[in-house]
Image (spheres, rainbow, N blue to C red):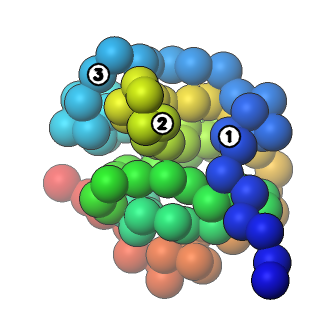
Amino acid sequence: MVSTERCINKLRAAVVMKDTTAEEINEYIRKNCSEYYEIPPNFRFKCITVLLQAPMLVGFKIKKKKILLPFEKICFGPILYEINATDEDFNFIRNATKNEEISE
């Protein structure tokens, strides 16, 4: 049996938003990111299973080399994290979401 890693702290992420809702996180990402994609619950990124109750947006800040990644902690609810990213990280998410960029 393979262990599923669910500790977001392993990504050395900075908290951008907490004590919030999934809708507020999605809106923040829409307003502040150059690209964003919808990821499903249990999406795997950098060997971490991203815990979510429902699909949410993950956002890219390409010039700053940052990804805004939502995560739901049972005791705290939705939290938005910012992590350092490489071009490979951006491409992984683009490919994993089948290049279905969400646009207004």
Q: Split into 4 quadrants, where in the image is the C terminus? A: bottom left
Q: Is residue 59 above or below residue 45?
A: above
Measured in 3D between alpha carbons, the distance from the residue under mark 1 to the one under mark 2, in whole angstroms, is 9 Å
Categorize mark 3 by other alpha carbons within 10 Å: few (<14), some (14-19), many (20+).
few
**Residue tagged 2:** 73
Q: Split into 4 quadrants, where in the image is the N terminus? A: bottom right
Q: Residue at x 54, y 67 (%)?
A: 43
**Residue tagged 3:** 20
In percent of width and height, residue 60 lies at: 55, 45
Measured in 3D between alpha carbons, the distance from the residue under mark 2 to the one under mark 3, in whole angstroms, is 12 Å
Measured in 3D between alpha carbons, the distance from the residue under mark 3 to the one under mark 1, in whole angstroms, is 17 Å
Q: Nearer the viewer, residue 81 or 77?
A: 77
Q: Is residue 82 visible?
A: yes
Count up the numbered dots: 3
- The quadrant holding residue 8 is top right
The answer to the question of whether label 1 and label 2 lie on touching residues, with beta carbons closer than 8 A, is: yes
Q: Is residue 31 visible?
A: no
Q: Which mark is residue 100?
A: none
Amino acid at the residue labelled 3: Thr
Q: Residue at x 32, y 54 (%)?
A: 53
**Residue tagged 1:** 8
Q: Earlier in the sequence, mark 1 or mark 2?
A: 1
Amino acid at the residue labelled 1: Ile
Residue located farthest toward the front when viewing the structure as drawn: 1
Disc nearest the viewer among 1 and 2: 2
